[in-house]
Amino acid sequence: MNVLIDKLPQILAAFGTTLQLLGASALIATILGVVLGAFRVSPVPALRWFGTAYVTIFRNTPLVVVFIIFVVALPELGFQSSFFFRAVIALSLYAAAFVCEAVRSGVNAVQAGQAEAARSLGMTFSQTLRHVVLPQAIRTVIPPLASIYIALAKNTAVAEAFGVTEATYQLDNLVRDFPGSLWFLFFGIALGYVIIVFFISGIAGLLERRWAVSR
């Protein structure tokens, strides 16, 4: 227990890196996922094909393989950047495929008459999507998006294998230095992840209740 208290500043710093990974990856994945979701329901065949191909590739590829491509292979092609940046890109591109499918399911849940009414008023496809369909679709996809962000929080642990000093990386170091405190360290790090998951679930529940009233 004393190890956990003595090393608390290092552990908190590592969780800070975990939160940075999570925040940056979630933001990029959300933006990219919404764009890909729009591609998936677009009337343009080439955009639908691109969205489908992206989801098929990234959703069926193990996250570790995506990390290997962006963290190990890209520098050999001349793309130099920090491990942290490459980890954010790998996590973002991976999670975007799942965000895309959540958004697409939300769009499909909106009654077709809503889009038809918007088009009868002269709106283009992009205007209909931005002003009519997506605002309603987002309300229905809060629970699946929360699940994706929770999975993303836990997936940040993969970055430790590639040298990013996030929480799991710090756990490995401390267990190596203090093997007798394994269980205290394990439960201490696990508690940190549980708090992050509770925070994401709380935000999702708050948004779901607030938007449910305005329906």
Image (cartoon, rainbow, N blue to C red):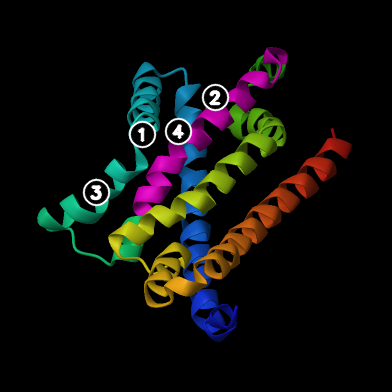
Q: Which residue is mark 1?
A: 58
Count of picture labels: 4
Q: Earlier in the sequence, mark 1 or mark 4?
A: 4
Whichever of labels 2 and 4 marks the residue nearer the N terminus, that label is 4
Write down the residue under mark 4. Answer: 36
Q: Amino acid at mark 4?
A: Leu
Highlighted magenta segment, given as a residue range: 88-113
Residue at the disc numbered 2: 125
* Real-space Cα separation, disc 2 to disc 4, in angstroms: 15 Å
Determine the residue located farthest toward the bottom in the rendered image: 6
Q: Are marks 3 and 4 in contact (CB under 8 Å)?
A: no
Q: Does 185 appear above or below 69?
A: below
Residues under labels 1 and 2: Cα distance? 27 Å
At which x and y percent is residue 51?
A: 39, 27
Question: Residue at 35% across / 30% down in the picture?
Answer: 54
Query: Which amino acid type corresponds to the residue marked 2 in the rendered image?
Result: Phe
> Which mark's residue is nearer the viewer, 2 or 3?
3
**Which secondary structure, mark 3?**
helix
- The main secondary structure of the magenta stretch is helix
Judged from the image, the secondary structure of the residue bearing numbered disc 1 is: helix
